[in-house]
Image: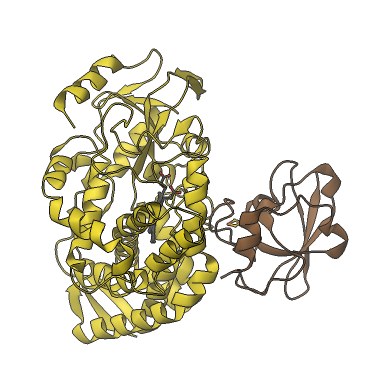
Chain colours: A brown, B yellow
Amino acid sequence: MPSIIFIHPDGRRQQIEASVDESAMQAATRHDLSGILAECGGNAMCATCHVYVDEGWLARLPTMGGDEDALLDGAAAERQANSRLSCQIRLAADLDGLVLSLPDRQT
Amino acid sequence: MSATSRTDHVASAQGAPAGVPSLDVDPFSAEFFEDPHPIHQVLREAGPLVWLDKWGVYGVARYAEVHAVLNDPLTFCSSRGVGLSDFAKEKPWRPQSIILEADPPAHTRTRAVLAQVLSPTAMKGVREHFTAMAAAKVDELLARRSFDAVADLAEAYPLSVFPDAMGLKQEGRENLLPYASLVFNAFGPPNQLRQEAIERSAPHQAYVAAQCQRENLAPGGFGACIHARADAGDITADEAPLLVRSLLSAGLDTTVNGIGAAIYCLARFPDQLARLRGDPTLARNAFEEAIRYESPVQTFFRTTTREVELAGHRIGEGEKVLMFLGAANRDPRRWENPDSYDVTRRTSGHVGFGSGIHMCVGQLLARVEGEVMLAAIARKVAAIEITGPVKRRYNNTLRGLESLPITISPA
Ligand code: HEM
Ligand code: FES
């Protein structure tokens, strides 16, 4: 059971238990985490599940697809080098402890 | 289409397959259009897979199966039509859509073009103007106080922004809603709604075909952006007009019924209007929840490309499967208090815009329209009262109203 630590824009840290094979977005919405909207339900079509990945974890994530890359350009909060869509981060045992920061807005 | 091909289809179906509950329900009837929810419940409770005897097709009405079918496009294909008509057996009533009625890999290429034209970045370009137009519309309606929320708001607002955003000429726009109504009726069975719509379609089809051409689309609009992608080599010059047609077919009547659904919800549930007024940032979710709650697009079909097992039943190749999006959106297996409209609900995962590779490519545009209209209402309107008979509009696919007389008072 990997756990994820979300850091809210006000600095608050929230740890949630996730399951292997769900996405970080699914884990977040399942725990009713504020700050992830996921309007398209994980289809990589809305960019409202934007997160900033803690630098140490970035290289360990699955690589970014073209859809995700294009969508991130239009995300509501500023795109940064560590921006990802959380619906495209599939969780695995080796991602236990993943740290994701939430942007100040998703729309 | 010919009467014989339809007879063949029904005859070849030979009743319900063993073990699959057979139901005598017509989802394309006045009874269903008036109130689909009791029928949805019957469909959901009968089993995960049902057989609809009237049309000789399978049906899925529970969230899990609707979601599964939507997300297996290679088995449950769209290229044989997303209506009852099977394009492998019948000629489509109009040239087939190259996005909605296409499968990968063909779909992947056309989809990428529309996804870029309607991207989050593109939405930033229209948002400010759409917001100003929504505020102006609500001010105008507040001055009148009493009006029909369908014609004067749900239709008038999208008509004041979408055709301009596409880059359409002024003349002939009165064809847009009849054309869309035709398209959505045509997904249904050969009932009176479909037949009459097709019989009367010639002028609307001619209008739309002409507006899809490059010379009729103003620079900077979504239409011109599609043609520009033909110059870039992403699609051919013949494909561009067909993709413009997709937006003209699916981009107006859907948001009309989406905004209409939201207004009807806020009029019926004053406590939810009060919450929205208390926090206008809920506007976007209030619109999304109206899409879940009313499901303006009620149904779509798929066709099996091979023998497949679904919910423990074997379905043969070439069978039509009807997905009840509206029933999935109120499945108690998936949603808490599914029959209540709750502007604070976590709506993520609803299938009102579909799911998977065909999930609505215009969803971002629909949300901008819905959000800015509900935000204007949240800030300016204190109360909405229904003041006359509410009338349903009958369409084989779209759920919405013909008339909603209301009186609003200023905040
Ligand atoms: C509230 C408004 C809307 C609703 C409820 C809605 C609903 C849907 C649904 C359920 C689908 C999936 C079809 C399928 O799986 O076979 C879809 C697809 C589509 N929608 Fe929408 N839609 C809306 C607004 C729009 C707008 C504003 C546009 C264009 C500007 C649009 C264009 C399309 C297109 C082109 C497709 C086909 C996508 C594909 O096959 O990849 N829709 N829509
Ligand atoms: S949930 Fe829509 S892009 Fe991730």
Determine which quarter of the picture holds residue B237: bottom left
Q: Is residue B345 left or right of residue B85?
A: right
Q: Position of residue B88 (x, y in %)?
A: 33, 28
Q: Position of residue B99 (x, y in %)?
A: 42, 47
> In the image shown, does A11 or A60 lie closer to the viewer?
A60
Residue B51: x %, y % from top left: 34, 24
Q: Quadrant of ligand 2?
A: bottom right
Which residue sits at x=75%, y=46%? A91
Q: Residue furthest right?
A: A56
What residue sits 69% from the left and 48% below the top? Answer: A23
Quadrant position of the C terminus of chain B in the picture: bottom left
Residue A5 visible here:
yes
Query: Which residue: 19% across, 32% down?
Result: B1
Q: Quadrant of residue B317?
A: top left
Decide: is A52 above or below B346: below
In this view of the protein, which residue sits in the foreground, B135 or B9?
A: B9
B42 or B402, nearer to the observer:
B402
Q: Is residue B303 left or right of residue A70?
A: left
- Whether residue B336 appears in this view of the structure is no
Q: In x, y percent, where is residue B348?
A: 54, 54
Count how many numbered circles sit on residues in the image.
Answer: 0
